[in-house]
């Protein structure tokens, strides 16, 4: 009886040690995945910033190249938005 209890205790200890190793492996895998996610997020943010800078430079270049067309387009968009908003507000009051 004592041998079986001792053997059971040893097996339980081995299983516990295996589970601790499994937990450590899982912890390392999760840590690596989190680090990879952080790096991917940094790359996406950097790419987004570069794209925004490029868009800004293109817009500034277009405004400098075609100032009258820019003013007319802005006026047209504002007029259209104002008319649309006026129609929507007018219909809402009815």
Image (cartoon, grey):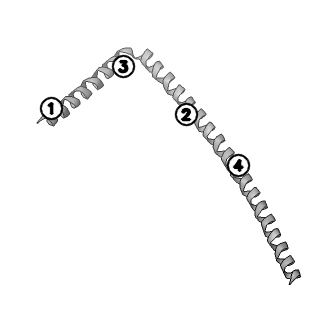
Name the residue at 79% across, 69% down: 15
Quadrant of residue 85 in the image? top left
Circle nearer the viewer, 1 or 2: 1
Q: Is residue 11 left or right of residue 40?
A: right
Residue in front for this viewpoint, 25 or 54: 25
Q: Which residue is mark 2?
A: 48
Circle nearer the viewer, 2 or 3: 2
Give the mark, 3 or 1, whose residue is nearer the N terminus.
3
Give the mark, 1 or 2, whose residue is nearer the N terminus.
2
Give the mark, 1 or 4, whose residue is nearer the N terminus.
4
Give the mark, 2 or 4, whose residue is nearer the N terminus.
4
Mark 2 in CB contact with mark 3 (< 8 angstroms): no
Dot 4: few (<14), some (14–19), or many (≥20) neighbours within 10 Å? few
Dot 3 lies on which element? helix
Q: Which mark is residue 31?
A: 4
Give the mark, 4 or 3, whose residue is nearer the N terminus.
4
Tally the marks. Answer: 4
Q: Position of residue 93 (x, y in %)?
A: 13, 34
Name the residue at 49% across, 27% down: 55
Q: Which mark is residue 90?
A: 1
Q: Which residue is mark 3?
A: 70
């Amino acid at each position: 009886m004592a041998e079986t209890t001792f053997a059971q205790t040893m097996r339980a200890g081995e299983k516990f040690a295996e589970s601790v190793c499994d937990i450590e492996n899982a912890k390392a895998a999760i840590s690596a995945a989190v680090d990879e996610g952080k790096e991917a997020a940094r790359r996406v943010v950097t790419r987004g910033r570069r794209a925004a800078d490029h868009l800004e430079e293109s817009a500034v270049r277009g405004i400098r190249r075609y100032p009258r067309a820019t003013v007319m387009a802005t006026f047209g968009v504002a007029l259209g938005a104002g008319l649309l908003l006026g129609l929507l507000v007018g219909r809402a009051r009815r």
